[in-house]
Amino acid sequence: SAKYSISADFIAEQNERLEAAINEDYDALKRALGRHGIDADVLVQKVMAFGVAIPTWGVGTGGTRFARFPGPGEPRNVVEKVDDCAVIQQLARSTPTISPHFPWDKVDDYAALREQAASHGLAFDAVNSNTFQDQPGQEHSYKFGSLSHTDARVRAQAIAHNVECIEIGRKLGSKALTVWIADGSNFAGQSNLTKALDRYIDAMREIVAALPADWRLFLEHKLYEPAFYSTVISDWGTSFAVAQELGPKAHCLVDLGHHAPNVNIEQVVARLVRFNKLAGFHFNDSKYGDDDLDSGSVEPFRLFLVFNELIDAERRKLEGFAPAYMIDQSHNVTDPIESLMQSAIELQRAYAQALIVDRAALEAAQEANDALGAHLELKRAFTTDVSPLLAVARMRAGGAIAPIAAYRASGYRARKASERPAVGGTSAGIV
Ligand code: LRH
Ligand code: MN
Ligand code: MN
């Protein structure tokens, strides 16, 4: 039987009941923004053009090293993951791309996968490689590292995997490879800190050499976990220095959960922008470490401050400035589709709020050393409730005014639970 999907009529029906109220709220917001010289309709256009990639591993239930509690109707393979990504885009209209992970998303026919995505209006964003786990039948183990391993044969295997990811990515229409390695050590003295980095850089040079001319390489740093004493690419400084050595194709990806506690992430972003080395983001939120919580759920102000730097950069019209936006979250207790829609909305919210900062007023306050005045301008933008604007953007794009409510009313998950009988766990989102 045909797979269940949510119809456009159903979304229109759901919207009908909310439309009058949302238009009223939008008109009030439009007047308020107009008093600051901001055209709400222009903002709606910008929000409609905003896109963030869904990670394939995010549509499955995540887990911790203690347990995983799978939800009903989880996608069992990448084809079903693409179906779920399509629903997220259909309802929330801010996630037109998918970021795949290999070998988790391996299939025989990538042209067919690309076509399936395209039939939903979806394309593929950066391809993620995985040398942090051993795969069945793999010749050499990554237990003691991959691209920085002491054994050249292990490094060669890890390089070959990344080259294969590039080849798959070409078939999918991707233009970037994201490399995160778990390499590091658990004991002082276990690893020669300098030699490990040297080996990594040499291996990465080979991967850079395999990149097509119009591709970029995203280096993703992370402080710790799974290595608990030292990690080879531990921080943005290391990432930046390596990206410099690797040349113009290499850029630094900022995963919001991969920093030391209290690091000023928005300043890291500003630095990377300044040196033209910002690759983009893995958005998520965190309280303690690499928690992979939903974007904007813990520190929405910090998220806003990150977007504030991005808008500042955009206004300076820096050549080649095109950060890639991706979500990287682990959904342990929610329906992943709901979490991803909500997260995409929170990202749009931070973006819209950053757009309504009065840049001239902010700059004047900064130049006059009016610390509080400058701060209040940011706070004015951050405390503006742009929800009606986001809803109107979704509505105009053909999405749902209230995506989570519409999703729940559709019964999509229950339908998938009967269409997708559980198969004893998926590889999705276990890290
Ligand atoms: C590592 C990481 C990296 C992986 C993903 C699954 O913590 O953020 O991006 O590819 O999680
Ligand atoms: Mn990440
Ligand atoms: Mn992570």
Image (cartoon, helix red, strand yellow):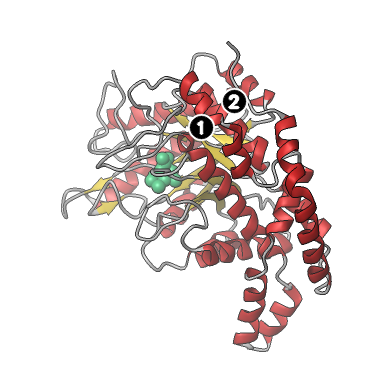
Q: Quadrant of the C terminus?
A: top left
Q: Relative to 67, is 40 above or below?
A: below
| Other-residue count near label 2 (Cα within 10 Å), few / some / many at <14 / 14–19 / ≥20 | many
Q: Which mark is residue 172?
A: 2
Residue drawn at (68%, 50%), measured in percent from left and top? 320
- In the image, the residue with mark 1 has its CB under 8 Å from the nearest atom of ligand 1: no
Q: Quadrant of the N terminus?
A: top right
Residue drawn at (44%, 58%), measured in percent from left and top? 236
Amino acid type, callout 2:
Leu
Report the front residue among 62 and 368: 62
Nearer to us of marks 1 and 2 is 1
Mark toward the start of the polypeptide (1 vs 2): 1
* Residue 329 place in picture, x, y as percent: 45, 45
* Residue 394 place in picture, x, y as percent: 72, 46
Q: Are marks 1 and 2 in contact (CB under 8 Å)?
A: yes
* Residue 256 place in picture, x, y as percent: 46, 55
Q: Secondary structure at mark 1?
A: loop
In the image, taking residue 220 as reference, residue 79 lies left or right, namely right
* Residue 22 place in picture, x, y as percent: 75, 54
User: Could you tell me if residue 249 is visible in this image?
Assistant: no
Q: Relative to 401, is 100 above or below?
A: above
Q: Secondary structure at mark 2?
A: helix
Amino acid type, callout 1:
Pro
Label 1 sits on residue: 100
| Other-residue count near label 1 (Cα within 10 Å), few / some / many at <14 / 14–19 / ≥20 | many
Residue drawn at (55%, 37%), measured in percent from left and top? 126
In the image, taking residue 430 as reference, residue 21 lies left or right, namely right
Report the front residue among 288 and 264: 288
Quadrant in the rendering for residue 308: bottom right
